[in-house]
Amino acid sequence: MVAICADDFGIDAQVDRAIVDLALRRRLTGASVLVDAPINQQEAEQLLEAGIDIGLHLNLTERLGQMPEDAVMPLRGLILRAYSGQISRLWAAQMIERQLDRFETLFHRPPDYVDGHLHVHQLPVIAPQLIQALGSRSLPGGFWLRDTRAGALAGSPWPERFKAWVIGHLGMAKLAQRAHAAHWLTNRGFYGVYDFSGQHRPFAVMLQQWLTQAQTGAVVMTHPALASVSGDPMAQVRVKEYEELAGESFGQWLDAQGISLRRASQVLSSLP
C-alpha cells in the first residue's frame, strides 16, 4: 500500500482542478496545500470532499497572494542561511505558525501531514521550529511528516539517484528523530524526484518503477496540472504527470500489479 501525493495545490487553477480530479478518480491519496495562495472556500471544500490526506506545503521561497516580502527568500539563500545559523528562530516560528493558522482557517481542522515546498521543512532552524509549533497543536490521528529520504531506486539513472540523495540529506535524519520522539509518523521511502526542467525518462516509466520498488508506507510525490501554467518552468511536466495518472492504462497497470493506493495517514497508523 503506497500513497501518491500531489504538491502545490493553490498555485494555479489548472493545478487545483487536476488534483481534485485525480483524487476523485482515486489516483491520488494526498494533496499538499500552499495556504498563502488565493484559495477560496469552495476550492477548500472540494478538496475535503475528495476524501484524501490534506497537508500543509510549508512555503518559505515562493511569494504568493498577499504574503509580505520578508516572508520568503530564494532557496539557495535560505539553505545557506539555515546551515550557517543566520536565520532567526523567531522569523521561522512566525512563518510556520502563520501558515498553520491559515490552514486551519481554510479547512477548519489541522493538517493530516506537513511537508515543505522545495523540501524546506527539513532545514536546520526550520525543522526544530516546525516540531515546536506542531507540538503546541491538537493534531489528528495518523498525523505524519514527509520524510524525503529516497526509497529503493535500483535501475534509476545516476542523475536521478544523486538528486534524490541530496534532497534526502538536507536535514531529514534529525527531523525524523524529532518526529518519532514526539510520537508522530513518517513515510517509509520517498519517490518522485527527477529533473523537472531538463531531460528525463518518460514519467510513466519512472512512476511504474517507483511503485514497483516502493515498500508499504512509501510516498510518491507528483505535480499534476490539467494544462500548462504560464511562466511555470514545470509547465509541460505537470501536464504529462496528470495525463499519466488519469489514464486508463495506469489504472489497469495498478490492478495487474496488485498495487493499492491508500492514504498515508491510514497506512502508517497500521504499521508496527
Image (cartoon, helix red, strand yellow):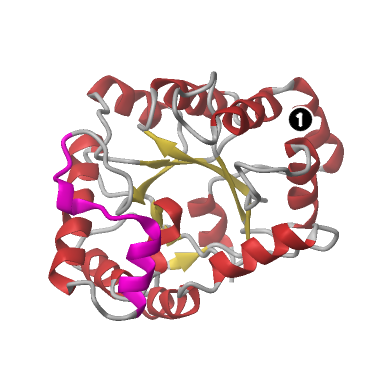
| Residue labelled with disc 1 | 250
Q: Main secondary structure of the magenta part?
A: helix
- The one of 223 and 25 positioned closer to us in this rendering: 223
Question: Which amino acid, by three-letter code, is at mark 1?
Answer: Phe
* Residue 176, x across and y down, in percent: 46, 74
Residue at 32% from the left image edge and 50% from the top image edge: 59
Tally of marks: 1
Q: Based on the displayed image, in which of its 4 quarters is residue 47 positioned? A: top left
* Residue 65, x across and y down, in percent: 22, 33
In the picture, the quarter occupied by the C terminus is bottom right
* Membership of 204 in magenta stretch: no
Q: Which residues are magenta?
A: 66-83
* Residue 27, x across and y down, in percent: 62, 32
Above or below, 152 against 199 in this view is below
* Residue 205, x across and y down, in percent: 81, 41
Query: Can residue 189 be seen?
Result: no
